[in-house]
């Protein structure tokens, strides 16, 4: 039997689908996630290791994407496939490969006391914390473990010990932690070691402290596996400062390391050698041209030289890769060319294939011993992450938007999304042409998109206005910084002539922000500068075009009471303050205004209202008469910072940045909500975000061609980088399946608690009156329904439709 589904919504049904008279149960709808943005793993500090499977493994102290901001452990294949395999460790550091083929490391926090753990992990990411630090035997280890010849692991911690100035500890394979030595930050012993230990040729362990010593610049020490401690050297001013780079055993059985600035002839850092009995020699003083700020350990190469990285310096001042002989002859192999592929904070790994692997700020790279460098994988999420601007429904039926982070240069992206969730990254900002777009796009009369970036550009990193065509061409129309304002976060609005208007929250003639106009060919005009008295800091969604041809907006600060204003500005730049907030009626409106079908404007105060002042929704006339419609209570949301939208039936929809679900954390400010409110103040909470389905929506909602709501969350989702979601307001059939007994199972979605009717017919052309009514029911609290059609077994064809009464 042929089965067909049709979602039919006649005029009556469609109107009811968005009607304010529908009764929805609070917080009952579940948003459908269309796309999950992935966060990048973050900055890599420790050197990569190569696992027994031939893949590379590393750690980052942040970037896990969760609310706690925990670190990650990631894997990169030699062909460049990057996978975050652990995303909930508290600042993991310093991986090493054990004799058992497992990967070992430490965390700076975590455990029952929060003082750190030691863990072991399989190459698939199955992780076990096998030892716990308790504050006395160590606290907050920043370097990795070292496996000594006795089969035990040894490490240092930044804090802990008898004097809370750091410790050296031993961990048995069974997880027994033994305190070996306590630092006291004195001139003789030093303190606060931030690096792991190095196994010397004599079986002793060698390390560095970051503080103490004769010049208070750290020390180099030796310690036996039994805990006998010897200070070998105190760093002097000209030698640099002990820091993050552990010592390296050279081919001549001496120890080598890097010291941070200030140190060396020009205070750019040094490379040094120290013998096991403490004879110290500065080998290289960096001069910026050959590198600057070495913070990573050195790696012995197959040619007997030592290889390493600097965080800055070189031809573009974004770091270098070098090699150095044991007598101090340095050769610069690579000068990084951009912030995206430069600024390495980790050392190099000599892999089994004879090449070196390392991490820059945004890449995992491979380098031959001769210095030929290629990118293996990007550490930035190329699809973007953390969207803050509203989606724009294009004339092609696809949605267009921006992300504030991610992309090739981690400066944000422009993307396109189909209604079924297929995302295509169209453009990556690079800083010079803008960075961190925090607003949605606007469509011009010429078919191009127009928007703003909050930073980047050619003037004070203060943002840009740009034009973008869907073939991928971006043109910077203006750069902010100075009298024209700074750091725009607004979605542009177009007048009848095709010019665009917006606001910048900073700088301007009075350092309180501006209103500007820009033509499609880049002619920029500052229309007004706020003074504080008439408002200050216009933020987020910018201006709204009134029916009278003027523009209306809000400022987050300034006005009579300092809590923000509502203003009107003519196309010629005449600015009038219409209303000053008093806090009790709302405060610090950030989301701008929307003009309703009744001619009034609607907006929200991000804070203020009835104590504890979690924000308000208000109505204001064009002559400044304000009416409070709703005060938030946390459970239904907190801090409405986005523009409201209005559906065809006059109902308003919006989001709150916080409030709602806390996940049981008493310190949580909540993960945000989506809501509906009528123009007379009848409020309904639609969605409570819970992290897994996204959190903290910074952007306004948009109504799609299907009558449903679409939006973005700044964070959350499985990838941690935010989501694009749909909230179903229009009833629809979502699934149909033939059961073994010949019956048909039907599923669908719609507004929770609202009534619907399910119909069937063998002839789709029949009028509704001749269809068979299968059920007259209501959608479940989660907005779903299911029904089994027992009459389908004998039907040669069966058509279905769903309607609302």
Image (spheres, rainbow, N blue to C red):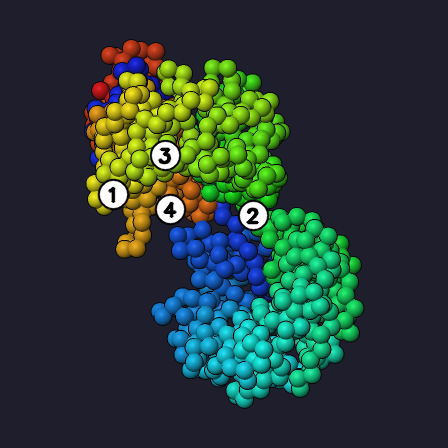
Discs 4, 1 touching: Cβ within 8 Å: no
What is the spatial separation of the Cα atoms under label 4 and label 3, in whole angstroms?
A: 43 Å
**Which numbered tag is attached to residue 533?**
3
Please report the residue visible at 52 percent of the width from the left and 30 percent of the height from the top.
451
Q: Which residue is mark 2?
A: 380
Residue mark closest to the camera, 3 vs 2:
3
Q: Nearer the viewer, residue 781 or 22?
A: 22
Please report the residue visible at 67 percent of the width from the left and 86 percent of the height from the top.
277
Is residue 639 visible to us here? yes
Q: Of marks 3 and 2, which one's residue comes earlier in the chain?
A: 2
What is the spatial separation of the Cα atoms under label 4 and label 2, in whole angstroms?
A: 21 Å
For the residue carrying disc 3, how many other residues have a C-alpha within 10 Å: few (<14), some (14-19), or many (20+)? Answer: some
Discs 3, 1 touching: Cβ within 8 Å: no
Across the whole image, how many numbered discs are drawn on residues? 4
Residue mark closest to the camera, 1 vs 2:
1
Is residue 641 visible to us here? no
What is the spatial separation of the Cα atoms under label 3 and label 2, in whole angstroms?
A: 43 Å
Location of residue 383 in the rendering, given as x and y in whole percent from the top left corner:
54, 40
Q: Of marks 4 and 3, which one's residue comes earlier in the chain?
A: 3
What is the spatial separation of the Cα atoms under label 1 and label 2, in whole angstroms?
A: 38 Å
Asked which secondary structure carries label 2, the reply is loop
Q: Of marks 3 and 1, which one's residue comes earlier in the chain?
A: 3
Asked which secondary structure carries label 4, the reply is loop
Location of residue 669 in the rendering, given as x and y in whole percent from the top left corner:
31, 49
Please report the residue visible at 40 percent of the width from the left and 19 percent of the height from the top.
550
Q: Nearer the viewer, residue 414 or 759?
A: 414
Q: Quadrant of residue 565?
A: top left
Residue mark closest to the camera, 4 vs 3:
3
**Which numbered tag is attached to residue 692?**
4
For the residue carrying disc 1, how many other residues have a C-alpha within 10 Å: few (<14), some (14-19), or many (20+)? Answer: many
């Amino acid at each position: 039997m042929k089965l067909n589904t049709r979602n039919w919504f006649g005029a009556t049904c469609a109107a009811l689908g968005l009607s304010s008279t529908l009764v929805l149960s609070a917080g009952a709808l579940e948003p459908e996630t269309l796309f999950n943005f992935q966060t990048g793993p973050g900055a890599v500090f420790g050197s990569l290791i190569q696992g027994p499977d031939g893949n590379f493994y590393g750690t980052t102290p942040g970037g896990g994407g969760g609310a706690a901001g925990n670190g990650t452990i990631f894997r990169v294949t030699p062909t460049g496939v990057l996978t975050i395999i652990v995303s909930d460790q508290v600042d993991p550091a310093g991986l090493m490969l054990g004799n058992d083929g497992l990967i070992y490391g430490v965390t700076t926090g975590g455990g029952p006391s929060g003082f750190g753990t030691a863990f072991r992990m399989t190459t698939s990411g199955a992780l076990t914390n096998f030892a716990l630090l308790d504050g006395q035997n160590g606290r907050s280890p920043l370097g990795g473990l070292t496996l000594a010849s006795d089969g035990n692991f040894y490490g240092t911690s930044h804090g802990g010990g008898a004097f809370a100035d750091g410790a050296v500890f031993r961990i048995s394979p069974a997880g027994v932690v033994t305190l070996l030595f306590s630092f006291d930050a004195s001139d003789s012993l030093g303190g606060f070691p931030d690096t792991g230990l190095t196994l010397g040729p004599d079986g002793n362990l060698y390390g560095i402290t970051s503080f103490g010593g004769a010049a208070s610049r750290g020390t180099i020490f030796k310690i036996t596996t039994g805990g006998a401690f010897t200070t070998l050297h105190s760093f002097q001013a000209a030698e640099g400062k002990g820091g993050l780079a552990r010592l390296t055993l050279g081919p001549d059985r001496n120890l080598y390391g890097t010291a941070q600035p200030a140190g060396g002839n020009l205070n750019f850092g040094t490379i040094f050698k120290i013998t096991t009995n403490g004879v110290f020699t500065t080998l290289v003083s960096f001069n910026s041209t050959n590198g600057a700020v070495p913070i990573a350990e050195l790696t012995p190469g197959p040619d007997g030289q030592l290889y390493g990285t600097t965080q800055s310096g070189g031809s573009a001042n974004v770091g270098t890769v070098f090699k150095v002989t044991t007598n101090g002859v340095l050769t610069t192999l690579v000068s990084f060319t951009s912030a995206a592929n430069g600024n390495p904070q980790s050392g190099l790994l000599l892999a089994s294939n004879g090449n070196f692997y390392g991490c820059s700020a945004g890449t995992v790279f491979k380098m031959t011993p001769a210095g030929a460098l290629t990118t293996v994988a990007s550490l930035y999420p190329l699809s973007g992450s953390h969207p803050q601007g509203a989606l724009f429904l294009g004339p092609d039926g696809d949605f267009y938007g921006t992300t504030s982070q991610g992309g090739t240069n981690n400066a944000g992206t422009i993307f396109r999304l189909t209604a079924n969730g297929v995302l295509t990254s169209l453009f990556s900002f690079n800083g010079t042409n803008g960075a961190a777009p925090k607003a949605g796009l606007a469509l011009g009369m010429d078919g191009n998109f127009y928007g703003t970036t909050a930073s980047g550009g050619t003037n004070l990193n203060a943002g840009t206005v740009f034009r973008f065509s869907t073939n991928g061409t971006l043109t910077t129309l203006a750069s902010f910084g100075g009298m024209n304002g700074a750091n725009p976060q607004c979605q542009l609005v177009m007048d009848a002539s095709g010019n665009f208007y917006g606001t910048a929250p900073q700088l301007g003639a009075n350092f309180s922000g501006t209103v500007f106009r820009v033509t499609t060919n880049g002619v920029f005009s500052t229309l007004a500068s706020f003074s504080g008295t008439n408002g200050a800091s216009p933020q987020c969604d910018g201006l709204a075009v009134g029916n009278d041809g003027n523009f209306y907006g809000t400022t987050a600060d300034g006005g009579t009471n300092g809590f923000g204003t509502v203003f009107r500005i003519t196309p010629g730049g005449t600015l009038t303050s219409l209303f000053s907030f008093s806090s009790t009626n709302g405060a610090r409106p950030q989301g701008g205004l929307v003009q309703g079908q009744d001619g009034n404007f609607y907006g929200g105060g991000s804070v203020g209202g009835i104590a504890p002042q979690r924000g308000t929704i208000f109505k204001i006339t064009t002559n400044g008469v304000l009416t409070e419609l709703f005060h938030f209570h946390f459970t239904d949301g907190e801090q409405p910072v986005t523009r409201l939208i209005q559906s065809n039936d006059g109902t308003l929809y919006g989001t709150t940045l916080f409030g709602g679900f806390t996940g049981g954390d008493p310190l949580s400010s909540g993960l945000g909500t989506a809501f509906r409110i009528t123009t007379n103040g009848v409020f309904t909470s639609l969605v409570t975000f819970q992290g897994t389905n996204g959190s903290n929506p910074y952007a306004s909602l948009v109504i799609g061609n299907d009558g449903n709501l679409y939006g973005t969350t700044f964070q959350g989702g499985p990838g941690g980088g935010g989501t694009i979601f749909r909230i179903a307001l229009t009833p629809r059939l979502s699934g149909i399946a033939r059961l073994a007994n010949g019956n048909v199972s039907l599923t669908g979605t719609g507004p929770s608690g609202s009534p619907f009717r399910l119909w069937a017919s063998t002839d789709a052309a029949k009028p509704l009156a001749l269809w068979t009514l299968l059920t007259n029911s209501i959608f479940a609290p989660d907005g779903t329904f299911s029904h089994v059609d027992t009459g389908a077994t004998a039907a040669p064809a069966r058509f279905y439709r769903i309607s609302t009464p």
